[in-house]
Amino acid sequence: MDKYEVVIGLEVHLELRTETKIFCPCPTTFGDEPNTHVCPVCLGLPGVLPVLNKRALEFAVLTGLALNCDINSHSKFDRKNYFYPDLPKAYQISQYDFPVAKQGHLSMQTNGETRVIGINRVHLEEDAGKLIHSEDGLYSLVDYNRTGVPLVEIVSEPDIRSAEEARVFLEALKRILLYTRVSDCKMEEGSLRCDANISIRLKGETELGTKTELKNMNSFKAVQKGLEFEVERQIERLERGERIIQETLRWDEGSAETISMRSKEEAHDYRYFPEPDLVPMEIGTQIVEEVKKRLPELPQEKKERFVIQYGLPEYDAEVLTSTREMADFFEDCVKGFPEPKIVSNWVMGEMSRHMNAAGLDFCNNKVLPEHLVEMLEMLQQGRISGKMAKDIFAEMFSSGKKAEQVVAEKGLEQISDQGVLEGIVEEVIKNNPGPVADYRAKKKKALGYLVGQAMKATRGSANPQMVNAILRDKLK
Amino acid sequence: MNLYQLKIHEAHELIRDRKVSSEELLLSVLARVEDVEGIVQGFVTVTGDYALKKARETDQKIDRGQKVGPLTGIPFALKDNMCSKDILTTCSSKILKNFVPPYNAEVFDRLEEQGAVLVGKTNMDEFAMGSSTENSGYFSTRNPWDPARVPGGSSGGSAAVVAADEVPFALGSDTGGSIRQPASYCGVVGMKPTYGRVSRYGLIAFASSLDQIGPLTRDVRDCALVMNAICGQDPKDSTSAPVEVPDYSSFIGKPVKGIRMGIAEEYFSLGINDEVRKIVEKAIARLDSLGMGKVELSLPHTSYALPAYYLVSPAEASSNLARYDGIRYGFRYEDSESLLETYKKTRSVGFGTEVKRRIMLGTYALSSGYYDAYYLKAQKVRTLIKSDFDQAFEKCDVIVTPTAPTVSFRTGEKVRDPLQMYLNDVFTIPVSMSGLPAISIPCGFIKGLPVGLQIIGKPFDEGTILQVAAAFEESMPFEDMKPGFGSYAKGGA
Ligand SMILES: [Zn+2]
């Protein structure tokens, strides 16, 4: 279907990791007993008033800066009015015409090329509660713990051109947001949610086609699958000469199709107006500069720096900077053991393999950078072999012990003493006249056998390179 | 003289000097309530037991030597739109007929901290929408000067119980005149402070950008004492202003010579009753004779204030009142098949006619396609009205006007004509739309019915208003004028 162009814009809702809610002092903890983190303010009882949590505003500014946005020096809250039981005031405090941040962009790599996707706006709002429906469908219960948890809504420009690009955008966005630590970005816990607007037009056309809005996609994969389905559905309609109906659709994971929720005519009129209970926010340069200081080096810059500073291949730099924690771990190791490529191999290899298997990450596993450095030094000094190192690392990873301790406990230290090894080699030569003769008859394979015998005699702890050299020397 | 007739500052002296206990004062007040409440019907809830407990606690504290503040042991009433922990708070609406808040309004906390004693919650127009207290979801309050007439509104209950000597003071709330107009109709002192002067935390919202709490008292000195207790920034209300609060009592008794009084022609033309105009003109002459300069000025956008107010305030109300949906608290229409039906029936049955009218008006004004023409335009008008006042206050220090165009009208006279009803607030609304402070004090009587004088001040300059009001009161006292409850016999209707 080369004649069509796909146009996608995404709206991402992100729960901010502040300790307390956006307009009251209730904690934002996830997963507790229903209605245990509530107060008159977040329950919207008569007469209560919201008071802005300054942290939430700072996090929103940080998010805006990380997405290269302009920060609005004059910003304000508005009420978005609609009735639903999970919304206790029957309006959501959100932002309409003066969001915290606007006009940014995000660059990402897809199919080997760099794509820049515009960010229309980043605004601050409060989350709603959660309905729990009874199994018989006779009643529903409401949990207001989530009500008033701060959210930012990030709206992209309609610059995304395929379902796959949408997924890549979300991955890149998540990577950046995790770097800023404003959110834990867990789609499965609902702290990151995504809706998509999608339309199709003929290539070269400048007007946008009629769009549909797609909701209820619960993973990045679901976003891609839902959009792929919707692209196909829209193109089929156009091919049949039918028009696209502007509507809101729900992605149904089970049947793998999009289902209509409501048409344009049924769309809500939210009757936005300025929130009179909160004063407008003046986000002065001083606040912006303060927040800027907390803006970390972001994945793209970090990756470029890793290539230049550490001479790493692009691939290594990409993997090492996939999270801020991994990049920090790598850099901490290199400080103690300035062999970047060796460190990179271990961090990307053994370290990641063990963490994936155990379901751990750089925040909660037991191996600290200095532990890995110590082990790498032992390896470099020849005190342990490469093979031993892997076993030692496994033990370090599971027990949290240091390399020295593991080596001592298991008697694993490599024998690299010239005198000791010469004695062992002489013994091997004496006991294996056949292979010795073979070697001298230019049958080179016999050397491997003899080295093996020396290793066996030391239960694997002899330094194989040294044994090799001593054997060659003695059999000259 | 009976204890219940005492003003705050008079009662305070007796309590301070240990001549009267707060319990004795309270018992006198409760007996008075018992006597006249059948006629006045100013209370939705009388908190007799609670008050007795508080009065005794206060007496014990005094016995232990705790300092007696100006409000210590003084009984008072709260308009029923201010939340009181564990005490019914209905907003005179059926939809909140069973609502018991788990928290106090900030003003209530501040008064209790001073040792004041809550006697009850007063009747009002439902959700403060109205000018006669006839829109109460429960019953109408009567004007103590003539029970066939209305006490004004929406703080009609608070004004009536103060006028009828049921309590020394009450708090009301003012959105477009809801303290000043009933103060005028009931012959008491009522002040609307500058928007942001008093915390709105726990005040059940009608129109958030206009609502402001203020005192209703028997004289200006008492007004200053209550202002001292309730004013000042509150971290729980982002719109409360970080402006220092002076000792308002220090303005009482100060000479007013040299304070420039602005007179705006618009306030003497818009549908004003001739006799009211004459009385207000006499009051102005009296102030003039005290040495205040008179400055003629114009507030040209005055006539646009009322229509603009009836777009802005219903718009905010339509959103503020959306939470009463029967899901979490208050009245719920039980016999519904669906969520939507629950919403519709709960709100259709739970709200009164005037409230529904304003919710519809406000919803319409905010609707997509109409927002710019109505809500936004009204906000622009609001800016013009405010700049009228800004310019006027370059030439004067206070502006003196009638509070309302007429005296109290007969119950039932205007209920079928909302526009006539709205016109009652034509002189108070421009002040509310500008966020300015103003007071209403009695300045004369027409056939036994009080007339109110409105004194408007610069933002946060309540002090000068009180200074002028106190000087006028001293020069023209109405101490011997007491409401006679018309033809009603003592003890009830
Ligand atoms: Zn809360």
Image (cartoon, coloured by chain):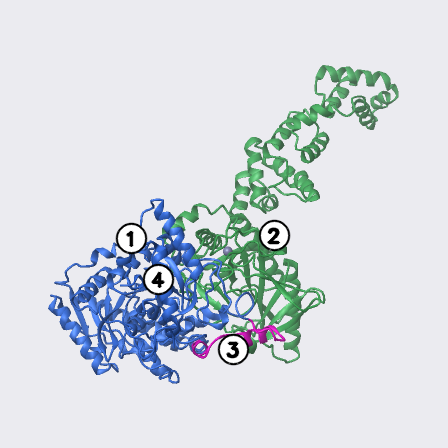
Q: Are marks 3 and 2 on the same chain?
A: no
**Where B195 falls versus A319 (above or below)?**
below
Q: Are marks 2 and 4 on the same chain?
A: no
Distance from Cα at disc 2 to Cα at disc 4: 52 Å
- Chain in blue, by letter, is B
Chain part drawn in magenta: B332-358
Relative placement, left or right, of A366 versus A420 is left
Distance from Cα at disc 3 to Cα at disc 1: 54 Å
Is residue A132 visible in the rendered image? The answer is yes
Q: Residues within 10 Å of mark 4 (few under 14, many from 20)?
A: some
Secondary structure under the numbered disc 3 in the rendered image: helix
Which residue was labeled with disc 3?
B348
Which residue was labeled with disc 2?
A32
Q: Are marks 4 and 1 on the same chain?
A: yes
Image position, residue B362 (x, y; %)? 43, 75
Please give the name of the residue rendered at 70% of the width and 25% of the height, measured from the top-left corner.
A407
Dot 1 beta carbon under 8 Å from ligand 1: no
Q: Nearer the viewer, mark 3 or mark 2?
A: 3
Q: Nearer the viewer, mark 2 or mark 4?
A: 4
Q: Tag 4, which chain?
A: B
- Chain A shade: green
Q: Tag 1, which chain?
A: B
Q: Amino acid at mark 1?
A: Lys
Q: Tag 3, which chain?
A: B
Q: Earlier in the sequence, mark 4 or mark 1?
A: 1
Q: Which mark is residue B28?
A: 4
Q: Earlier in the sequence, mark 3 or mark 1?
A: 1
Are the residues tagged 3 and 2 within 8 Å (C-beta)?
A: no
Q: Which mark is residue A360?
A: none
Q: Which mark is residue B19?
A: 1
Q: Amino acid at mark 4?
A: Ser
Relative placement, left or right, of B207 versus A198 is left
